[in-house]
Amino acid sequence: MMNFDFTQEQEMLRQTVRKFVDKEILPHMKEWDERGYFDPNILKRLAELNLMGVCIPEQYGGMGMDYNSLAIVCEELERGDTAFRTAVSVHIGLNSLTLLQWGTEEQKQKYLVPQAKGEKIGAFGLTEPNAGSDVAAISTTAVRDGDDYILNGQKTWISLCDIADHFIVFAYTDKSKKHRGISAFIVERTMPGFSSRAIKGKLGIRAGNTGELFFDNVRVPKENLLGEEGEGFKIAMSALDNGRFTVAAGACGLIMACLEASVKYCHERKTFGKEIGRHQLVQQMIANMEAGLQMSRLLVYKAGFLKNKGRRNTRETSLAKWIACDFANKAADDAVQIHGAYGYSNEYPVERYLRNSKAPVIYEGTREIHTIMQAEYVLGYRQDKPLRNMLPAWEEK
Ligand SMILES: Cc1cc2nc3c(=O)[nH]c(=O)nc-3n(C[C@H](O)[C@H](O)[C@H](O)COP(=O)(O)OP(=O)(O)OC[C@H]3O[C@@H](n4cnc5c(N)ncnc54)[C@H](O)[C@@H]3O)c2cc1C
């Protein structure tokens, strides 16, 4: 049986996040965006609301809600600002769920439990100055030395670079094996030889923290190898299945924000003797936003359904991420258009939405990479094989 209803718990969750965004994020957003300030207190408040581990099982310190509840949190947070949804995407989607899927029991106790409680923050270091879409082009290395690995290299464009306590970092343990020689490691900020530096001058997500990580002979104990040696590429791709899901859900929230601002302005602004909402070409932009929101949501919640069942969802998640982010980007462009010249200034929030909407079309697989993936699935050039470790299905209480 198909069921499009949210549970009472999910409705309450949405209301909780919405109220939080209205009260504690939106009143400050213009100033934080202008100053390029990431407020770490927001993550502390999210932890107090038990949201930093919303879909992590209770046995690991989380709330034990389903994967679509994570989508609801992301949707509502991005209605506030992309920066905070991005933070949750990396903390839960890319890091905590990866520990849940691939971590040993010891790793889960040591790293996942404090992350799910929001006592520690997790991030994800894959991209390098010369390796984004082409993951196998990374050059960070991890060389075994007794009971440790020694990491050397650099990552860039890493969300929460200066904030996170733990990072899942990808490095070559055997370059000759190409992508099968990449391994994943849990690196702590306090490990000697680790440092980070924020990137300035970003187009959007200015209230977010993004930057570089440096590894200068960082000694990582062998217990911090995530999965097996050579499994890093698979781990990275499975992490992206979860990260992309949160990005797609967030994009729905951005479309909601565009609609809210645009509908309000349509009723306020008059031209040629009537509200601009009465002009058919303006209505077309509103209708396109609504269509984009509803279509994106269906794709997101379908991917969440597959996650809840413990089924592979790379194809469905990629489609949801591609389509939702493109719709959000277009919705933000149209929201500025609807506001005319006023949309071009930060007197209204829509210029921030437009700037923020661009990064999600680039990160976690660019628009072009997802387009290629979808074509390859349809043409039969790409198939998903079962993974050694699957993301655990949601266990209903
Ligand atoms: C705000 C922000 C936050 C980020 N956070 C993180 C993070 O937390 N962790 C992390 O690891 N990374 C993060 N990233 C990096 C992001 O994942 C990469 O930017 C992304 O994967 C694209 O890589 P690239 O920028 O190197 O572009 P490139 O891979 O160099 O691509 C450049 C252009 O070429 C196109 N292209 C590349 N290959 C192909 C192809 N085969 N066919 C067609 N077109 C192609 C791309 O679509 C793009 O248009 C973040 C980026 C941003 C902007």
Image (cartoon, rainbow, N blue to C red):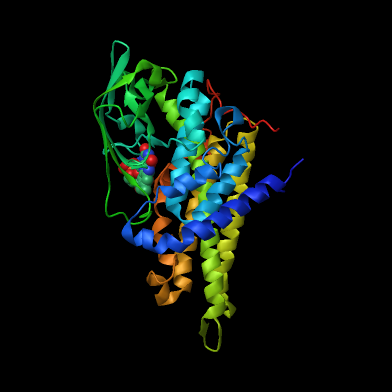
Rendering coords of residue 310 (x, y %): 62, 30
Residue 387 appears anywhere in the view = yes
Rendering coords of residue 363 (x, y %): 40, 45
Q: Is residue 251 above or below residue 271?
A: above
Q: Residue at x 24, y 28 (%)?
A: 193
Q: Residue furthest right?
A: 1
Q: Is residue 316 above or below residue 268?
A: above
Q: Is residue 127 left or right of residue 339?
A: left
* Residue closest to the eye, 294 or 268: 268
Rendering coords of residue 255 (x, y %): 53, 59
Residue 324 appears anywhere in the view = no
Q: Is residue 138 above or below residue 207?
A: above
Query: In the picture, residue 256 is in which quadrant?
Result: bottom right
Q: Residue furthest left?
A: 216
* Residue closest to the eye, 174 or 38: 38
Q: Residue at x 47, y 43 (%)?
A: 88
Rendering coords of residue 357 (x, y %): 43, 56
Q: Residue furthest bottom?
A: 273
* Residue closest to the eye, 11 or 44: 44
Q: Residue at x 51, y 46 (%)?
A: 46
- Of the 4 image quadrants, the one containing the N terminus is top right
- Of the 4 image quadrants, the one containing the C terminus is top right
